[in-house]
Image: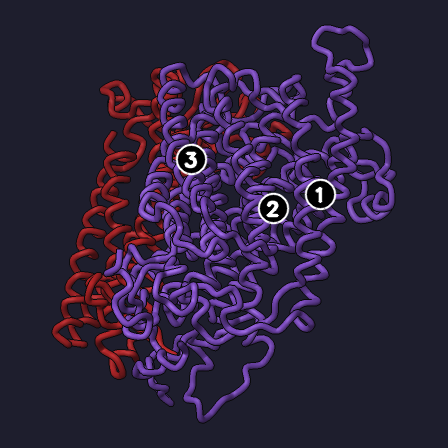
Chain colours: A purple, B red
Amino acid sequence: MSSTVQQFPPFREPKSDHAHDDHDHDHGQGEHHEPNFWQKYIFSTDHKVIGIQYGFMALCFMLFGFGLMLFMRWQIAHPGVPVPLFGPLLAKVLGQPAAGGAISPELYNSFGAMHGTIMVFLGVVPLAFAAFGNYVVPLMIGAPDMTFPRINMASFHAFFLGGVVMLVSFFIPGGAAQAGWTSYSPLATTIPTNGQAFWLVGMVLLITSSLLGAVNFIATIIQLRAPGMTWMRLPWFVWAQFVTAFILLLAFPPLEAAGVLQLMDNVAGTSFFLPTGLAVGGQLVDRSGGGSPLLWQHLFWFLGHPEVYVLILPAMGIVIEIIANNTRKPIWGYKSLVYSSLFVGFLSFIVWAHHMYLTGMGQKIATFFQATTMIISIPSVIILTCMFLSLWGGSIRINTPMLFALGFLPMFGIGGLTGLPLGLAAADLYLHDTYYIIAHFHYVVAPGTIFALFAGVYFWFPKMTGRKMNEFWGRVHFWCSLAFMNIVFMPMFAQGIKGMLRRMSDGAVNYSAARVPNAIDALPGSVMQLNGVILWAAICLGIAQIPFIINLFWSIKHGEKVGTNPWGATTLDWQTPTPPPHGNFAHEPHVVRGPYEYSAPNHATDFTPQDEPESSSAPLNPNAHH
Amino acid sequence: MEIPYTVQARPDTGLYNAKLGIWLFLASEVMLFGGLFSAYVLLRVGAEPGMWPHGWLNVTLGTINTLLLALSAITTLLAWAACKVRDFTKFKIFHACTILLALTFLGIKSYEYHDKLIHYEIKLNNGTFADGHLVEKSADFDLAKKTGTVTLHGHIVTDEKELMDLRSPEAKSAKHEEVTVAATDIKSMGNYGPRHNTFTAIYFTLTGLHALHIFGGTVVIFYFWGPGSRMWKTDPERFTNRIEVSGLFWHFVDLVWIFLFPVLYLT
């Protein structure tokens, strides 16, 4: 097969000097100058390096966010008890809020706010969209790089700065933001810490980053598709990233607007989100008033809900690629997938207020958003159904990426189905702000999206390094993660249904009146005991990630060596040298067929790459037989 | 390695990369200002009856600024057209005009800001309000220590609502003169800065963000006019594209002002 590729004329002749200096190391093959460390890894404009930068940073942030959660789980299970092992360290680094190694309510609040912020904006989105998108999309569409390589680099640097600002805010007097990742006003303005201002500045940087990324992705997918790569020949992963980029492009700016307004509230003393007559601690606040707390919620959730699809669509894209690859047959319902993703993208802009049923915005508005929320579940179910039906009748090849992809299906299914009661205003009034919500969206994002991201890491690792990750430890990682994820999150449904609220720093001890037997509305002791179960499951979940971390680094040097296409995949990302050089393709790929031509009849192998010329695939056009 | 379609348009999309990129960026800018304008709508709709200001801004200055930006849109277009017909001298002249018009706009805008920042509303202990532009504060004026006096050029009203609609006949016929107030009579005092009320807040935020866009656009256009114009000699086609793309941004910023002007000045 590789011999046939070379029939094509060379794609781009190397030039020794030309006017477009988009890259600092793209000279002719004759004069190779080795870029130094800074040029190669910090100020690189190569989409693959930027993808890996994003991926590495995002994984680090996810580990950090997970650590914050462990402290919180300890505090919930054992309120006021000093944290074992890490308590003294916490007290030393953070001072008063962690006095004696115990977590104060203020510290709990800021850990909660930052856990959400870090996981969503610094962990999952950068990994799912920026890392995988950057690394894989240009390869899949047969492009030499992103359209705007320097803007791509600027995007990563803005992300990095945003992360630094977020981390620094832990160490300022008063500590990091404490008003939850949703930063509702007036709480976000009246808590006496500058952490919120840091949070807002960090968010503006992160929004800038994803904005630059989104423009780049859309322009790349529209402009740099290789010859023959028509829209309906795009791997669905590319479609998912395309829709995600549009969501980021259009949904993030209103949050930026909201961020600017809240920054004005916090720094310049305005009252955009502060109502007239606001009192804090019994004192009338010295503000003009006249603002609207609801306005913040509208602007926030206008981003916030589309953001859910930013989290889930790239993950679904990864799962589709891996399922097609490991069932060795075309994906079921490609066109339905494409149109569903477009429909989800559009509809995600008109469901936001289902997060606000409890705000008193009015029955009529609630009814409208309830209807759109029910409608948006249809394309999501179509996508999931296509995934399940793709398994039907396949001779499924089980490996670590496939295990994680298969794990995604029921886990995301649980997350999605438990969302239905929340979309209905009547049920939501009861469940709102309970642990049921926590369980619901964590099922979507943690064993859902993050499993898909793990699948993607295992799947594309051989392309990045030329080596496979260890299969045995990969499976250990999967089965342990699957078990402990469920032990962590499943009990939360029960706690939520029993009425345990989500934001209490003492694990509901005071609120529940658990110590007063037979008190009205008391949470039963069994519900409170689940806090201990969850704590230990969370710790075990953390331990279960150790094989992954070691496997990841160990395999870079010592993993099993593999060729350019170890999974026998059809898409263009596997038809390049491994690891792909700067510029990706030795020859411009000419695409002649759809993305999932597995097990085509009359073909020597059970996969037909997208750029393999027709003549060599079969004596006759194989499609003619159908 | 070279990115395709940086200069020439891709046949099936009819666009070169940067042109698509700037349109996408402008789409996100529409959402940014869209969010802010909806904030304006919600704040105004939610204002207590009679408490949303009218006629607080100088319509003459606003009109002049509108004309300046409209004119700069024309010169931007002509500068691009001059590049298209490969007339570098004309390009230089037209974009010099754009830059001067933009700087004049920013000058007028900062005068307007200054005018608001020296405009004070003083709540007096007897329940009335002294309102006007600051003339002077006495040397020993200190609000906290209750010493000294402050002099405004304005008037005293009994109800704060009288200060809201400056287009009304009563407001127009009000006599403005120098008013001196002793610190001991002052309950609270503040200028018409962002924190004065939600109108000044959204006014400063919207026009401030817009002014930042004007400033950014001016910096970019100045770069292409000055040091960046070296590209004209090596790659005029690509340079022309850059002028087109920066021009698209400039037209968008002008367009935002076309919305800001009626929304803030004329209502």
Which disc is residue A68 wearing?
1
Which one is nearer the viewer's eye here, B143 or A333?
A: A333
Instruction: Give A102 or A429, whichever is nearer the viewer.
Output: A429
Residue A18's place in the image compared with A370, above or below, is below
- Identify which residue is drawn at 49% across, 69% down: A565
Q: Which residue shows up at 45% across the image and 56% down it?
A: A328
Under circle 1, the secondary element is helix
- The image quarter containing residue A555 is bottom right
Q: Is residue A378 above or below residue A341?
A: above
Task: Measuring from the top left, give residue B100's x and y in whole percent.
Answer: 26, 61
Nearer the N terminus, badge 2 or badge 3? 2
Describe residue A190's horizontal placement relative to residue A301 as left or right.
right
Q: Nearer the viewer, mark 2 or mark 3?
A: 3
Mark 2 Cα-neighbour bin, 10 Å: few <14, some 14–19, many ≥20: many
Name the amino acid, label 2: Ile
**Residue beneath label 2, please?**
A118
Going by the numbered disc 1, the residue's amino acid type is: Leu
- Residue B12 visible in rendering: yes
Circles 3 and 1: CB atoms closer than 8 Å: no
